[in-house]
Amino acid sequence: MKNFDYYLSLTSEIGFVEQINNTIVYADGLPKIKPEEIVLFETGEFGMALALTPESVEILVFSKKFIRTGTKVVRTNEFIKVPVGQRLLGNIIGPMGNPITPMKPSKTPFEYRLINNPATGILSRITIHRQLETGVPAVDLVMPLGFGQKELVIGDRKTGKTNFLMQAILSQAKQNNICIYAAIGKKILDIKEAEEFFRKNDIMDRVIIVASRFQDPIGITYLVPYSAMTIAEYFRDEGSDVLLVLDDLVTHAKFYREISLLGKRFPGRNSYPGDIFYIHAKLLERAGNFITNKGEKSITCLPVAESTQGDLSGYIQTNIVSMTEGHLYFDAELF
């Protein structure tokens, strides 16, 4: 991004921070700002317009640094994009493309795509008919998955969900398909363990890890699954079948609930906001089996939902069950 003065001369609009509520700030001014537009503070921090009222703009800040009242803010006329390209393979990146581990230098430029693309229309989709092998016989023989399917992986903590997902990624990477692992609000140790598994099995060159750590700002964690889906769409358009693992959407919902409660949204069931179904539905609808310029290509999505004591009737769990085309339940007693 360019500097504050550049955007000020470009848009000729300036605002001032009036109120601060943790990771959300309220600013006046900026009369032509649009929802989800990026804003830049004079201190160099940036954020995204979450909501607009006649009096102020509600901004989600992508930083843990404290922003003072009276700080100048400018709109940029830009929206959040993620860099996409073959260079991402074998790397761990944040949701905005920033490398978490050092990235090899390359002269190949990145392409940039908006992370909130609408789902592809029905005319470009095709019936799912190719079987996707996970490498786990119990699944492949009894409940086979198809390329382009959305299959929920649900179960309590420590019931083997991650082992299954790693095996599925290993199987697909060995078949030369692209695998994207979205680690949402994970411990650094968990991300490191996933990376070590991929490196040990010599498949890291077919895998991208899009991660946010538990200590990252809430807004960064919120963006992870959308960013991972955008990268998956790029590789689909380039002619690859893609396996996308979203680990996990219950954590994602908790972070979004925190954003909503800080923004004083009206809380619904379990204090979740009313649009919690929408934010996951618009994400998962982007997966599927498609007719592309490179032939029939797919994004197979495996969202993960953690349950508590085998209870599948939780709000977020039942939401995701209704969005997916099948469910793999990991039972604690059977495990």
Image (spheres, grey):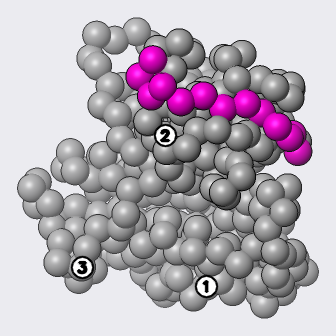
Sequence-earlier tag: 1 or 3: 3
Residue 172 in sight from this viewpoint: no
| Element class at badge 3 | helix
Judging depth in this view, the residue of 86 and 12 nearest the camera is: 12
User: Quadrant location of residue 264?
Assistant: bottom right
Q: Quadrant of the C terminus?
A: bottom right
Place of residue 268 in the rendered image (x, y in percent of width and height, measured from the top left): 82, 81
Please name the amino acid that badge 1 sits on: Val
Place of residue 69 in the rendered image (x, y in percent of width and height, measured from the top left): 86, 29
Q: Which residue is at 61% across, 63% downward? A: 164
Q: Residues within 10 Å of mark 1 (few under 14, many from 20)?
A: many
* Residue 80's disc number: 2
Q: How many angstroms separate mark 1 from mark 2 (CA)?
A: 29 Å
Eyeballing the image, is 155 above or below 293? below
Q: Which residue is mark 1?
A: 321
Q: Which residue is at 50% across, 49% downward? A: 34
Instruction: State the extent of the magenta-drawn residues as a range.
Output: 9-21
Q: Which residue is mark 3?
A: 122
